[in-house]
Image (cartoon, helix red, strand yellow):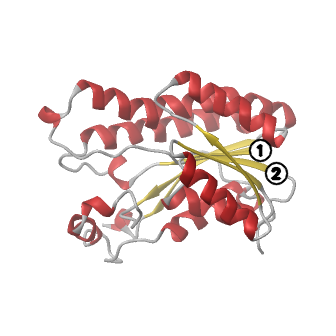
Amino acid sequence: MTADFTGKTALVTGSTSGIGREVANQLAARGAHVILSGRDEARGEAAVQAIRATGGKADFVRADLTDTRSVTHLAERSVELGGRVDILVNNAGLYPFAPTAEVPLSQFDEVYAVNVRAPFFLVAALAPAMAERGSGAIVNVSTMVATNGMAQMAVYGSSKAALQLLTKSWAAEFAASGVRVNAVSPGPTRTEGTAALGDNLDGLATTTPLNRVGRPEEVAAAIVWLASDAASLVHGAVLPVDGGRLAV
């Protein structure tokens, strides 16, 4: 049965490209009013126009998730545009790869601001209203390196490990009020953002039983399912979408 999001508003962070844009496309195709966000206004407007061209409903809000004031504005503006936010997808993320000794303080702070602090305060701003209405869905995007240690991924992996713990904490906090909080844990996925990894991306894929790089639409499908009523009994889960990496 195809999920129906008619009448619902979904905020998807980092949705001007890659997995986030595919999530926005799939939610809009199923009737949701989608609020896209990112730092690049031109890409954001292009993504919105593409959705509208197919009959979907979408708006763009420019947001810099390293800035707490911008995070607050994103939450407030999303409610203004959609009337309310029923679905929050915390997809935006930074993923620098570097030896621990070579990570500057500024980069460490930036990664944690985007990957941990921004989702925390978006949930703080939007989940209470979901709880008051008795329904809502939050999906956080993690990574397989949050549970599998890999060299040069200490900052990225640890930030997403924090997001996975927040997923479980929020599920415990909001489940009784009808708000579902879950996460997906993608493996290597070919997007604009991972293009810089080159052959390293394919190398990561060889560590999975499937032995191939994933596609954004495959990860997005799992996110959309978690956001749908079909996942009504799923709370606090971290769903691996990684070609079987969990199995080895």
> At which x and y percent is residue 228?
73, 58
Residue found at x 53% / y 48% = 14
In x, y percent, where is residue 148?
29, 51
Q: Gap in Å between the C-alphas at discs 2 and 1? A: 6 Å
Which image quadrant: the N terminus? bottom right
Q: Are marks 2 and 1 in contact (CB under 8 Å)?
A: yes
Question: On the rendered structure, is 231 left or right of 186?
Answer: right
Q: Is residue 166 left or right of residue 123?
A: left
Amino acid type, callout 1: Asp
Q: Name the residue tied to disc 2.
A: 8
Residue ID at (26%, 71%) = 202
Structural crowding at the residue carrying mark 2, measured as other residues with C-alpha within 10 Å and reported as few (<14), some (14–19) or many (≥20): some
**Residue 146 in view (yes/no):** yes
Task: State the image coordinates of residue 58 (x, y, percent, origin top left).
Answer: 74, 54
Q: Amino acid at mark 2?
A: Lys
Numbered badge on residue 111: none
Residue at image coords 35%, 64%? 188
Q: Nearer the viewer, residue 182 or 41?
A: 41
| Residue under pointer 1 | 86
Sooner in the amino-acid sequence: mark 2 or mark 1:
2
> Is residue 138 shown left or right of residue 6?
left
Where residue 110 sits: x, y (%)? 37, 31
